[in-house]
Image: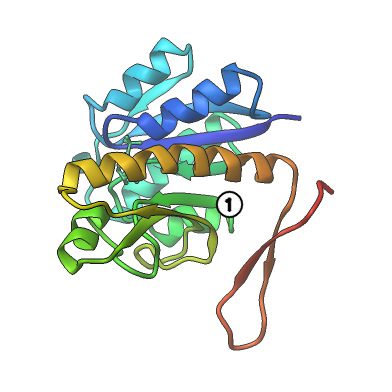
Amino acid sequence: MPLRLGVLVSGSGTNLGAILAAVHAGKLDADVRVVISNKLAAGGLERARAAGVPAVAIPHAGFASRELFDEALVACLCEHDVEWVVLAGFMRVVTPVLLDAFPRRVINIHPALLPAFPGVDGPGQALAYGVKVAGCTVHLVDAGVDTGPVIAQAAVPVLEGDDRDRLAARILEQEHALLVEVIGWLSQGRLRVEDADGKRARVVIEARAR
Ligand code: GRF
């Protein structure tokens, strides 16, 4: 059975595009049931429509609280029979309303090697700090900002002469590959979370599909 995904976007949606392309090419056993954006004009919604995927804009400004906004997200995701939620360039902090509806089934792609450089503009932070290796992270989403258990990471070199946009573009290429790879592991049932008393939860990717 293909993994039933809901993808949340705020911008151009190139990560969504990578998922849709992998599904279309038969490289990912997943079914994007719905794409939701908090922005009416998000490019990700256009990508969804072009792929024949339900595309729904739910502007966050229309809600009195983050929790009420998340209730609308959950209603739409459940209406489309979603089992895993992918934050792909989604720029809103989600609340326990969403996380409790999809316990340990919300993942996020972040353009930095967490825990370094959380929040906005990971590539810009990396360049400003002067690191020599940047990268991206796919993690389970918890109630914090970019603080959930790490699933996978990819390293990206910072090259002489890099400006923010050149580094961000190099990282973005790796984001696309990493996100598709992780969703593939989810579709094979290979993700396991170890909860040791008093320690951070740790993600294990099992060697073979269950
Ligand atoms: C990506 O770097 C993503 O990690 C960040 O927003 C950027 C654009 O993502 N959150 P996309 O092109 O909208 O998928």
Observer-nearest of 137 and 66: 137
Q: Viewed as shown, does residue 174 lie left or right of 194?
A: left
Q: Quadrant of the N terminus?
A: top right
In the image, ligand 1 is in what quadrant?
top left
Q: Viewed as shown, does residue 39 lie left or right of 138?
A: left
Q: Is residue 89 visible?
A: no
Q: Is residue 11 above or below residue 151?
A: above
Q: Is residue 69 above or below residue 32?
A: below
Residue, x 65% and y 26% (percent of image)?
Answer: 27
Residue, x 18% and y 42% (percent of image)?
Answer: 165
Q: Viewed as shown, does residue 1 lie left or right of 92?
A: right
Instruction: Tell me where residue 145 appears, x and y as whole percent.
Output: 34, 64
Observer-nearest of 188 and 132: 132
Residue, x 58% and y 17% (percent of image)?
Answer: 24
Instruction: Tell me where residue 164 appears, x and y as whole percent.
Output: 17, 48
The residue at which mark 1 appears reads as 105
